[in-house]
Amino acid sequence: MGPLKKIIYNCRRATFLIEKKLIDRLTLREKMELRIHLFGCSVCRVFDKQSALINKMVQQLFKAPKDDGAHLDDNFKQELQHRIEDELNKN
Amino acid sequence: MLATSLLNPHKWVDNHADYLYAYAISRISDDEQARDLVQEVFLAALEKADKFEGKSSERTWLTAILKNKIIDIYRKRSSGLNNAVKVAEKEQEDFFYEDGHWREEHWPKELGFEDTDPLHNKEFNQVLQRCMKKLPKLWLAVFTMKHMEDEPTENICTELKVSSANFWVIIHRTKLNLRACLQKNWI
């Protein structure tokens, strides 16, 4: 298989480059490779779009908690503050 | 002596406990462990309160302590024999043909969320979280550290003892499985 055909065929490699692109920088050569592949591969174009979106969604999950987020119960909190006060009084 | 002008431990629980707890639980998905962590953070913070210089806010400082403890947990969870990695690798073994071409039955398909705003779609988020839980612990650790605070790649490699080449393999494989899981459970 010639090098161009390899690029066109290799979706595994293309998805790898997509992941690298999202986090780091691609080399010029890698950029060309990915561009050529995506030009001819609609399946990987779907992957490309979804992958970026998944990262965004995951980042959103970790963002500062919203009002409907998890809460500690009051008992636990009271005990916790007691522990802190105990420690403070030791000094 | 405590720099009481800078820190106010008497109000720590009121001011920060829920925040720290939510921060922890979204990253380690274990209620009991998250509670323990919040307590540990406060106690550790008291011990090194004299080192607090007030360069950041109280909350930022406490969160940084928590973050380090979470990384410790990732490290512990992902060390040791890792059968889960083999299982996860097997799962994606037949995604591609030898030459790297997608097998038709594993083609990424449009899931109908690409052009809308799925960020506030609760159901979709739940599927996403379920799919993340299925990942091998080491993969999840790498993936989470990269995305939770945009941790530099070198740090992740050092903390979790993975080579840089392996880091990229993990990032790639994680996404292949995660995306496939979303497709399987969403359609």
Image (tube, grey):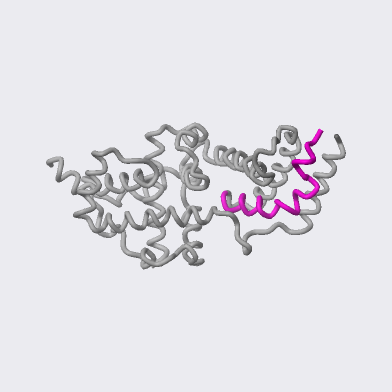
Q: In this view, does A70 lie to the left or right of B172?
A: right
Where A10 sits versus A41, above or below?
above
Residue B46: image location, x then y, percent: 76, 38
The x, y position of residue A3, in whole percent, is 15, 40
Q: Is A21 placed left or right of A89 in the picture?
A: left
Nearer to us in this view, A9 or B147: B147
Give the quarter of the figure containing the N terminus of chain B.
top right
Would you place residue A39 above or below residue A17 in this image? below
Of helix, strand and loop, which mostly describes the magenta segment?
helix
Q: Is residue B148 above or below residue B126?
A: above
Does residue B111 appear left or right of residue A14 in this picture?
right
The residue positioned 74% from the left and 59% from the top of the image is A73
Q: Quadrant of the C terminus of chain B?
A: bottom left
Which x, y percent locates residue B166? Answer: 39, 36
For this view, does A30 lie left or right of residue B79?
Answer: left
Count the numbered circles shown.
0
- Residue in the foreground of this view, choosing between A23 and B164: A23
Q: Is residue A83 magenta?
A: no
Q: Which of the 4 quarters of the picture holds residue B8?
A: top right
Which residues lie in the magenta part? B1-27
Q: Which residue is the extreme one toward the right?
A: A89
Q: Where is residue B55 in the image (x, y as percent from the top left)?
A: 65, 38
Q: Which residue is drawn at 37% across and 54% down?
A: A51
Q: Tell whether position B10 is magenta.
A: yes
Residue at 30%, 48% (x, y): give it. Answer: A15
In the image as oriented, which residue stretches furthest toward the left?
A: A2
Q: Nearer the viewer, residue A68 or B36?
A: A68
